[in-house]
Image (cartoon, rainbow, N blue to C red):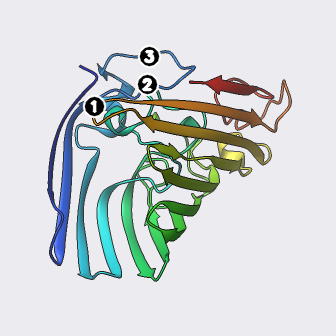
Amino acid sequence: VSNAFVLLSKPQGTFQWALQGGAYSIPVVGIAGNKTIQSGANTDLFGPLPLAYVEYVPNANFNVSAGVLATLTGAESTYTYLNWNVQRGAVWNVENAVTRGVRASFTTGKLTATLGVDDGFYSGKFGAAEGALTFAPDSTDSLLFVAVIPNSTTPGNPTASIANKELLNVVFSRTRGKLQIAPYILYARSPAAAGLGYAGPESAFGGAFLANWTLSSHFSTAVRYETLHNSSTVGDPSGNADLIGYGPGSGVNTYT
């Protein structure tokens, strides 16, 4: 079994909540797979309750949520049953996926602003700030800007070997009939941190184009192209020289 979830939620009223529990795998293109229940991978990364939050919604324009929350970053879901492709992409693998913290959202007209404080790359310490701005001119188009800024001294953990990465992300989404597209770009920067062995700042840049075509009410098919590159050079000795997982100075292109 790759995904076995029970989802419970109360999505209406002033006080709302949601729980998602079970077992799951998180396959990533270009990365070797692991068993659904395996130490240091998949279900073990975020635990059997990877989504659990309460939300205060006094009106349609404002809400505050707290708990274990899904990331604001990127265009792909952490969980296979919600993702267009079976495997997550290489750019997704640089992003954070699940955070523990508090965030507030305010909507006015076609704009939604979100601010939060959390543990970034699931570090267990509330040393990260996040913000997002969404512009949705209509029901079929949206433009999302996201920033994640962890504490520069945050050490790595099983979910991210380098967890002090600052992220800047832009996602455009459009739906036209049976076609959905979601191109996006991501910039990641790891600042210097002597205590972690990071001699200087390092960065990576990636872009992805995702599309999904609905064939019928029962079938759909998706495509994805990505390019992702470290800014470091081959042989760079700094501990944060590889932000994409293929070695200092490396770059990848993926086709799914």
Residues at marks 2 and 3, CA–CA distance in whole angstroms: 6 Å
Residues at marks 1 and 2, CA–CA distance in whole angstroms: 23 Å
Residue 176: image location, x then y, percent: 50, 51
> Mark 2, residues whose alpha carbon is within 10 Å: few (<14), some, or many (≥20)?
many
Q: Which quadrant of the rendered structure holds the C terminus?
A: top right
Residue at 71 percent of width and 26 percent of height: 252
Q: Earlier along the polypeptide chain: callout 1 or callout 2?
A: 2
Residue 72 vs 212, above or below: the answer is: below
Q: Amino acid at mark 1?
A: His
Residue at 76 percent of width and 35 percent of height: 230
Disc 3 is placed on an element classified as loop
Q: Earlier along the polypeptide chain: callout 2 or callout 3?
A: 2
The residue wearing badge 3 is: 33
Q: Which quadrant of the rendered structure holds the N terminus?
A: top left
Camera sees residue 90: yes
Q: Are marks 3 and 1 in contact (CB under 8 Å)?
A: no
Residue at 68 percent of width and 42 percent of height: 207
The residue wearing badge 1 is: 218
Disc 1 is placed on an element classified as loop
Q: Is residue 243 left or right of residue 236?
A: left
- Nearer the observer: mark 3 or 1; the answer is 1
> Mark 1, residues whose alpha carbon is within 10 Å: few (<14), some, or many (≥20)?
few
The residue wearing badge 2 is: 27
Q: What is the total number of numbered labels drawn onto the structure image?
A: 3
Q: Amino acid at mark 3?
A: Gly
Disc 2 is placed on an element classified as loop
